[in-house]
């Protein structure tokens, strides 16, 4: 399915694509829960990395069904593109959820069974991507299937062994040990979808929904522990900021002071050690300031705040071509 829609980009020029997308993203249509402005650390990172990537991800791909436009459909598919390494991370998050749910039901996760489940999920996702089909309720579109000239850093056999190793490390990790040491009722959240809180003093907009989805949130004896599973670089940009937003979310949701909320990074790539976020977890005030500053920069590029519209000319492509190499949208920038 995605192959047919993406082929449309071979029939037009970059200028024609930009014109079609600009018309789509400037159209003034009353916003709803899905199209109103919202904020997340991921959105901030995308905005900082490349303005064109941000525009394509958050504006050009929205309202794809209503648009009924081949250009918009092509961009929506490119938004789904994910590297193989990210798919591995998704698989590990799923089996982590399964293992924790077993604990909540007072059952012990079997390491070999869980590893086999992880391999099954991994393989089925790869197969779904190759067929252009859904995996469960989601689309998996792997980078090297859309860009066959850009092979992943891991071949399939190595990737599957990484999945097995990460699953075993998860079960032996300090963070999972902490989970097992607490009563089942201490587990309040496990990678819940669409977790959010509302900021009521955002620049110019007033109220803005802020998305924050902790991998695991534990609440016991008046203390909150938030666990962030990491299968890659734990020094990557944004980890500290994400920790601050997690703390702010927990403060809003559970009404606890910041000193009662701890965020730990479970580094599954390094023997499952639990570490503090780089440079420590930001205070509530730091997190608020960070979000306000980010929102301000974003809305300065918008056309109309009420309708959350944007024009493509305010979102140029990056000059750093190294960013483009693993960007799913590079076909829409004629940089593939």
Image (cartoon, rainbow, N blue to C red):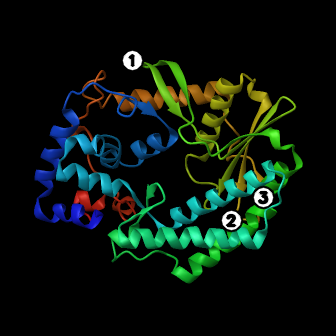
- Residue 71, image x, y percentages: 19, 52
Q: Secondary structure at mark 3?
A: strand
How crowded pointer 1 is (Cα within 10 Å; few <14, some 14-19, many 20+) is rated as few
Task: Please state which of residues 258 and 72 is positioned toward the viewer in this rendering.
Answer: 72
Label 1: which residue? 204
Q: Quadrant of the N terminus?
A: bottom left
Q: Any mark on residue 95, and which?
A: none
Position above or below: 34 against 134: above
**Cβ–Cβ under 8 Å for marks 1 and 2:** no
- Residue 164, image x, y percentages: 67, 73
Task: Please state which of residues 276 and 61 is positioned toward the viewer in this rendering.
Answer: 61
- Residue 305, image x, y percentages: 31, 23
Between the residue at mark 2 and the residue at mark 3, the CA separation in whole angstroms equals: 9 Å
Residue 212 lies in quadrant: top right
Q: Secondary structure at mark 2?
A: loop
Q: Quadrant of the C terminus?
A: bottom left
- Residue 308, image x, y percentages: 30, 28
**Cβ–Cβ under 8 Å for marks 2 and 3:** no
Between the residue at mark 3 and the residue at mark 1, the CA separation in whole angstroms equals: 42 Å
Q: How many marks?
A: 3
Task: Please state which of residues 229 and 160 is positioned toward the viewer in this rendering.
Answer: 160
Label 2: which residue? 269
Residue 190 lies in quadrant: top right
Position above or below: 306 against 100: above
Disc with the residue nearer the chain's start (3 vs 1): 1
Q: Is residue 53 visible?
A: yes
Label 3: which residue? 273
Which residue appears at 73% of the width and 71% of the height?
Answer: 113
Q: Secondary structure at mark 1?
A: loop
Which residue appears at 40% of the width and 19% of the height?
Answer: 205
């Amino acid at each position: 399915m995605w192959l047919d829609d993406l082929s449309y980009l071979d029939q037009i020029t970059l200028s024609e694509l930009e014109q079609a997308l600009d018309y789509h993203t400037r159209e003034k249509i009353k916003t709803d829960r899905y199209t109103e402005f919202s904020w997340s650390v991921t959105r901030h990172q995308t905005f900082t990395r490349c303005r064109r990537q941000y525009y394509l991800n958050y504006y050009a791909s929205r309202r794809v069904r209503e648009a009924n436009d081949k250009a918009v459909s092509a961009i929506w598919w490119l938004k789904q593109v994910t590297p193989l390494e990210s798919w591995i991370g998704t698989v590990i998050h799923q089996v982590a959820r399964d293992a924790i749910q077993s604990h909540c039901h007072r059952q012990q996760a079997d390491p070999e069974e869980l590893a086999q489940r992880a391999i099954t999920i991994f393989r089925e996702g790869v197969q779904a991507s190759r067929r252009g089909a859904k995996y469960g309720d989601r689309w998996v579109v792997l980078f090297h299937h859309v860009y066959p000239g850009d092979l992943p850093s891991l071949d399939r056999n190595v990737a599957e062994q990484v999945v097995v190793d990460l699953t075993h490390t998860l079960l032996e990790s300090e963070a999972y040990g902490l989970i097992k040491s607490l009563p089942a009722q201490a587990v309040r959240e496990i990678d819940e979808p669409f977790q959010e809180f509302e900021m009521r003093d955002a620049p110019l907009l007033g109220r803005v929904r802020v998305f924050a989805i902790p991998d695991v949130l534990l609440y016991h004896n008046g203390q909150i522990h938030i666990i962030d599973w990491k299968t890659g670089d734990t020094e990557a940009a944004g980890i500290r900021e994400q920790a601050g937003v997690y703390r702010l979310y927990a403060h809003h949701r559970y009404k606890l002071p910041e000193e009662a909320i701890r965020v730990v990074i479970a580094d599954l790539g390094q023997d499952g050690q639990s570490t503090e976020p780089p440079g420590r977890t930001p205070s509530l005030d730091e997190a608020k300031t960070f979000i306000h500053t980010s929102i301000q920069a974003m809305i300065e590029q918008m056309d109309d705040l009420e309708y959350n519209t944007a024009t493509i000319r305010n979102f140029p492509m990056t000059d750093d071509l190294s960013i483009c190499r693993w960007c799913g949208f590079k076909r829409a920038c004629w940089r593939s």
